[in-house]
Amino acid sequence: QLQLVESGGGLVQPGGSLRLSCSASGLTLDYYGIGWFRQAPGKEREGISCISSSGRNINYADSVKGRSTISRNNAKTKSTVILQLNDLKPEDTATYFCAAGRNEYPATCRGVPHKEEYDYWGQGTQVTVSS
């Protein structure tokens, strides 16, 4: 079974950057579309970015567009998906999750990711933006 692990979260000052990583154990990520989501206390889980299984399609939510870059490395030994977050703001404070899905919507990443379309989830990594 696919198990996802996020890393790279932490405490950062406003305007700073973080590089979040999503890696898999047990199976390769090559055949999965990957989405990044975040959830702040008391709020719904929000899809912020996705990348298709091929890496050719990418989408961002308006809340992070222009400040984020998603990429993937489908290496045979260990495939990873990176979400680079720049110009971070206090409202970016949340737990960030990566998720994987093989159905058409996540695999093709035709739009902002919807959590219902993804089958496997990591435990999340905390991002706190504060001075």
Image (tube, helix red, strand yellow):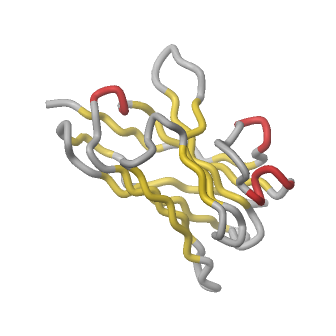
* 83 horizontally vs 47: left or right: left
Outermost residue to the left:
131
Q: Residue at x 20, y 30 (%)?
A: 130
Could you tell me residue 7's position as x and y percent? 43, 55
* 85 horizontally vs 30: left or right: left
Q: How many marks?
A: 0
Could you tell me residue 9's position as x and y percent? 36, 47
Q: Residue at x 59, y 74 (%)?
A: 79
* 53 horizontally vs 128: left or right: right
Q: Which quadrant is the N terminus positioned in?
A: bottom right
Q: Please name whichever residue, 87 or 90, is drawn nearer the observer in this view of the structure.
A: 87
Q: Please name whichever residue, 101 or 87, is drawn nearer the observer in this view of the structure.
A: 87
Q: Is residue 84 above or below residue 36?
A: below
Could you tell me residue 72's position as x and y percent? 55, 69
Q: Quadrant of residue 109?
A: bottom right
Q: Which quadrant is the C terminus positioned in?
A: top left
Q: Quadrant of residue 54?
A: bottom right
* 34 horizontally vs 32: left or right: left
Outermost residue to the right:
103
Could you tell me residue 113's position as x and y percent? 67, 43
Q: Is residue 28 above or below residue 115?
A: below
Q: Residue at x 36, y 50 (%)?
A: 85
Q: Please name whichever residue, 32 or 64, is drawn nearer the observer in this view of the structure.
A: 64
Outermost residue to the top:
42
